[in-house]
Amino acid sequence: MRQNDVIVIGGGLAGLFAAITAAKRGRQVMLVTKGVGAIAIGGGSIDVLGYDATGKPVRDPSAALGGLAADHPFAILGQQRVETAVQTFLGLCEAEGYPYQGDLQHNQWIPTALGRLKPTCLTPLTMNSAILKAATDVTVVEFEGLKDYSGRVMVDGLRQCPGYAKNYSLVSLKTDINDGRDLTALDVARWLDSDSGQAAFIERLTAAVRPGSVILLPPVLGTKPDYRLFHALEQATGCKLVETVGLPPAVTGYRLRRLLVNCLGKLNVKMIEQANVVRGIVENGRCTGIVTGNLDRERTYRAESFILASGGFFGGGLQAEAGRAREVVFDLPITVPANSADWSKEKLFFAGSQPFAKFGLQVDGKLRPVDASGKLLLENVYVAGKSLAGYDYCVEKSGNGVALATAYQAGAEA
């Protein structure tokens, strides 16, 4: 049995940022996770609110927060708390030597691997879409063997976007990875982590591009949360570089996770990995501990407060069963239509949110779970991220923003 001030359940963006927030307030924190979370394979950008309820693109996320439904996590927190979370995140990245750009008042439109543009709020410096938009000459770089990224698809897609009818050229480069399989962006990034990989890439890239152009390439500029390779390439080529959003595993999210895990280490946060939380121990409306169960035996960990950031349905924190849905650690109730046919619309991609996309835990103003009548269920458990009800992160483009804001609030409360 081990005693802590705060235990965080979940190792995604919400769990990591909640643990950092609590630890920075002097709490002794333990983070328990069965995996690395979606952040490790995601795009690494922070979407706050890309589209409103009508499907209209949002230019100013801050202004749009006031028009959300009352049960939306952002509405529960309020604009000021969301702004504080964003500023805290930006300050953390700056302090860790990997600053992000952007603010809550402006959305950016960044290119995806399909040559389309997606709205987001905060990005690494390598994804500065304003450079691409202002460019006249753009060199699109692809890598031989990287099947999830086609330069031709990128060019054809961008040419259909208003304001992106530019002079495009396509360059295909070889890597020195010769293991006979298709490559991922993470493979190329690891190659570029090595001195030999960097030297070879700089030589091949400078020979293929003209100084003064903008180079558009997949997210492969190393796995480390720093900009040394990025700046070295810009200096060597005389060009500006822009990384696109990539298909999983997308290295930009991997870098962000490394930054946050490094920060946890500096704050002496204990991290228990490959640990499956099977149940909570509840006494008189309070959680006193959690139990993990793996192949060897069960272990019990106790604390004063708990943060549930277990990832919703996608992360296994919520489960759907015949006629009901539930949260798996504390068996907390989730309000769903009695008729399962009402959980979804007939057409999957209709103009609006699917009902099931907004299923999750209802919470009070402190992010503690409540039932359908508003009755408090656990007074020292705080919920963050995708397990929350009231929002559709896929349609809204709000996933990492909700994770960040609710994690900050949960960490502060705990």
Image (spheres, rainbow, N blue to C red):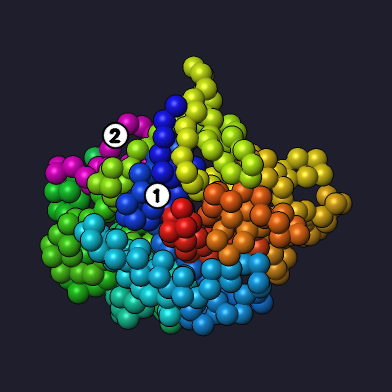
The residue lying furthest to the top in this view is 296
The quarter of the picture where the N terminus appears is top left
The total of numbered circles placed on residues is: 2
Asked if the residue under mark 2 is in contact with the one under mark 1, i.e. CB atoms within 8 Å, the reply is no
Query: Nearer the observer, disc 1 or disc 2?
Result: 1
Residue 249 in sight in this render: no
Mark 1 or mark 2, which has the lower sequence index?
1
User: Residue 195, located in which quarter of the rendered image?
Assistant: top left
Q: Residue at x 35, y 44 (%)?
A: 28
Q: Disc 2 marks which residue?
A: 178
Left or right relative to 168: residue 198:
left
Looking at the picture, does residue 272 appear above or below residue 109?
above
Closer to the camera, 332 or 4?
4
Identity of the residue drawn at 19% across and 55% down: 229
Amino acid carrying mark 2 in the image: Asn
* 222 left or right of 276 in image: left
Q: Residues within 10 Å of mark 1 (few under 14, many from 20)?
A: many
Residue drawn 36% across and 73% down?
102
Q: Position of residue 150 (x, y in %)?
A: 42, 56
| 185 drawn magenta | yes
Point out residue 55 in the picture as x, y percentages from the top left corner: 63, 75
Of the pair 117 and 39, the residue shown nearer to us: 39
Q: Position of residue 341 (x, y in %)?
A: 84, 52
Measure the alpha-carbon separation of dots 1 and 2: 40 Å
Q: Is 68 left or right of 158, judged from the image as shown?
A: right
Magenta residues (range): 177-196
Residue 194 percent across, percent down from the top left: 18, 42
Along the line of sight, which residue is nearer the eye, 221 or 257?
257
- SS at badge 1: helix
Kind of residue at badge 1: Ala
Residue identified by numbered label 1: 19
Q: Which mark is on residue 378?
A: none
